[in-house]
Amino acid sequence: MNAIPLSAEPFDVFSTTLSNCLRTTFKHGHWLLLLTILAIWPFAKELCSDSLVLSSQSTDVAHQFLFSRAFGFGEMSLGNFPLWNPYSYGGTPYLGQFQSALLYPLNLLFLVLPLERAINVSFVLHVLIFGVGMYAWAAHAGLKPAAAFVSGAAAMFCGSFFLHIYAGHLSNICSMAWVPWIFLGIDGWLAKRHAIWLLLAAGAVALQVYAGHPQYVYYTAVVAGAYSLAFLIGAPRPAVAVAGLLVVYPLAALLSAAQLLPGLAGSAESVRAGGAAYEFASMFALPPENFLTLLAPDFFGNMRSVPYWGRCYLWEMNLYAGAGMLLLALHALIRMENQGLRRRLLALLGLVVLLAIIARSPLYTILYHAVPGFSSFRGTSKFLLFGALFLAMFAGYGMDLLLRRRLPGWGFCIGILVLGAVLRFVGFFIGSGSADWWAFFRQALGVSSESYLLPVALSQAGMISAARELSAHSIMWTGALFLFFGFLFLAVRYWPAATWLLLFAAVADIFFHAKGTVSSFDINSATYPEVAKFLEQHPGDHRTMNLFNPDSAMLLQSENIWGYDPSVLKRYAELLFLSQGQDPETAGQNLKFHQSHPLLDLVRCRYAMEETAPDKIKISPVTEDAFPRFFVASRYKVEPDRKSMFEDLRNPSFDPKVTVLLEEEPVPRPEKKAARFKLRLISSTTNQWTLEILTAEATLLVMTDAWSKDWKAVSLPGSVQLTYDLLPAYHALRAIPLAGGRHLLKIEYVPSGFYLGIWLSLLSLSAVGVCLSVPKLRRHLFMAHEFRWKNLGKAHGTTDFTD
């Protein structure tokens, strides 16, 4: 393309830029359009429906995101920015729970579209962003547009990305979508040293943070660091390269500070504070046997005709990237001329596979204890996403080689045909029923503590037969694909047009497999009209024990003593674990309720709701004596030691109505006689309560909502007290010492760093905007005197972007 001289007249600059844009559009537009069609096609039914919601009904959209998005963006549409969620876990941070994704720009969809459409469009949009990002990264690396299209399709429909839609992992998909853009920014900076690439990488990281899945942010940082180190070796001006790369994550932190600071504050008080327990954090590592899914994606079940019977969850453990894509990647590994690039990408692929499986080895103990933040997450199998990206890049390189007529050898083609025949034989052998080793293998996995399919299911003859048949079919089908692609690779040697047939066959293979995993449910099945009617008929300032779908309380606007997501405050979780006779030291997000306890009265639990049959919910009273939200008490006991406080709470003779347990002396000190008081609620939102209280003597005002250090009591004009302390009571609830007289106070929640984060994000975004809009600064970002558009694609020293 034509260069743009820095001294050119404005009209010349405009005409040259327009010409460049038109040429680029003509070159890449039809491939990007095809990617768009592929991204939309599998979801056409859901996009056209007024009630269907993407994902399985037994997974996270139906258990979390449907209700979280309804609550958060419903409040925003009413003019309230919800910093606190009163409906789960007796109250819990909402903005501080990263997966709320309140500030994620693309979630504006939830303010303008119906809930079910917004969820569906969000899934589809991020599939497209992911694919286009992979296309752009591959094209920038020098691949021809058709080869970059192969890489984009391989990424979009690979098992480690696409299956998360079935699982309802909305925040996962949204965060994963920006990963290729981060690597594109790194490549661009290393190739050209133009700051615009650093802005691209930092902006993509910031969008990852806002999208709501911190584990992918963390894992991306790990892999991006390894990727940068790999390609810094031999790079010109290494000091400048390193300095630029070190800017990416600090700049991203500034851009995302509005979410990052409240999120870190919320995490510091949650059950994940200080890291998860070793047993929890080491869950969901890649099982070695699941390498079979690289060839036979349905070997362990397809979650449709046969449930997944392997270890952990299929959407976390599926390596399938298409038979054709795998063979193209192998062709690249054999025929790539740039040996340095091949070694780097292969080493990175090996690294992420090792990290995916590492929790099954003693090495994980070192990472768990030595690497900051590594212990905060479970599921190292999520590193497979990056393996899929590197495999997709190899597949693109393989297609690029074919397009440039660097053809496979006879040995490669014959090897594919032989492997295809072997797979067909193995599949037939398994399906014949004489493969006793397969039955032993299935039974061993079925009784594993990591299998979530009931063992009784695997003892049923029908299930065994169906599972065996599907395993056999999956292997035989892959064998047939290998035979087909083997003949295509042979045909390419003599008929160049067969290259295009191979391209579209490889894409069709992975596309139709991914399309077959799409699932959806009717949103009306998650609105629970009978429960809503019961709550309307039984109003009151109480909570429920929602056991059928805990987070549905956000949609039903019924406060719940528990929840589904991992945002539960640690103190509150410890209190509820103690109520169920469990060790508070083991408190986490998973708790089974099996007994009544005075502490359940204290947290205002009035009704228990459980599903007794499909679409049948039983509602029964827990107590007639649930506490009110506000009450006063004069007697108290100071227990600064948490273990001593737990002993008091365990004591059957302890009456929380009579004695308030505190961790420090209250000021003013309550008078030891029955308190007389009147309380008037002036106003309330999710984030604050404004009260007028009249009391004749000093006392303690107790609020039976979960305590957080960021809840404050603020004196209003006309109040008898100038300042108020908001203390933890009973370890996890709230108490405010009051003097005798008239009190006007506001109890409000503002997460630590909220306002600072807003200002940091706005100022850093403004600074970026100024740099991009001021011509002199923009030239430094976009251009250098040696700049030539045609060199844009030489990230790895391969071929030109414009070839």
Image (cartoon, rainbow, N blue to C red):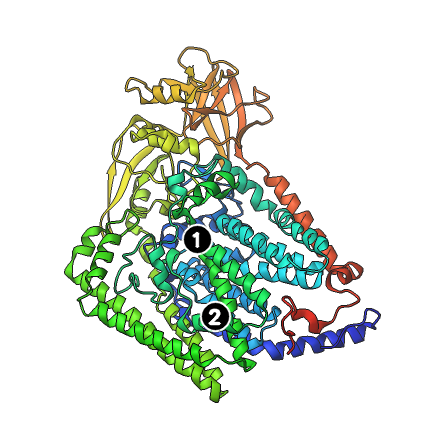
Give the left or right position of residue 443, taking residue 174 as reference.
left
- For disc 1, the marked residue is 356
Check disc 1 and give the amino acid type.
Answer: Ala
**Which residue in the structure is indicated by mark 2?**
329
Query: In this picture, is 484 found above or below 226?
Result: below
Q: Please indicate, yes or no, whether residue 187 appears anywhere in the rendered image.
A: yes
Residue 651: quarter of image: top left
Kindly give the residue lying farthest to the top in the view shown. 672
Q: Amino acid at mark 2?
A: Ala
In this rendering, is residue 311 above or below 643?
Answer: below
Q: Residue furthest front?
A: 411
Residue 42 lies, in percent from the top left, at 40, 70
In the image, residue 457 lies at what x, y percent?
20, 55
Disc 1 versus disc 2: distance between alpha carbons? 20 Å
Q: Residue at x 41, y 41 (%)?
A: 87
Residue 589 image-quadrant placement? top left
Q: Which sits earlier in the primary sequence, circle 1 or circle 2?
A: 2
Residue 559 in picture, x, y percent from top left: 38, 39
Quarter-wise, where is residue 471 in the image? bottom left
Point out residue 389 in the picture as x, y percentages from the top left corner: 50, 63
In which quadrant will I find the N terminus? bottom right
- Who's the residue at 19% across and 61% down the image? 436
Instruction: In the rendered view, tell whether residue 190 sits above or below residue 11.
Output: above
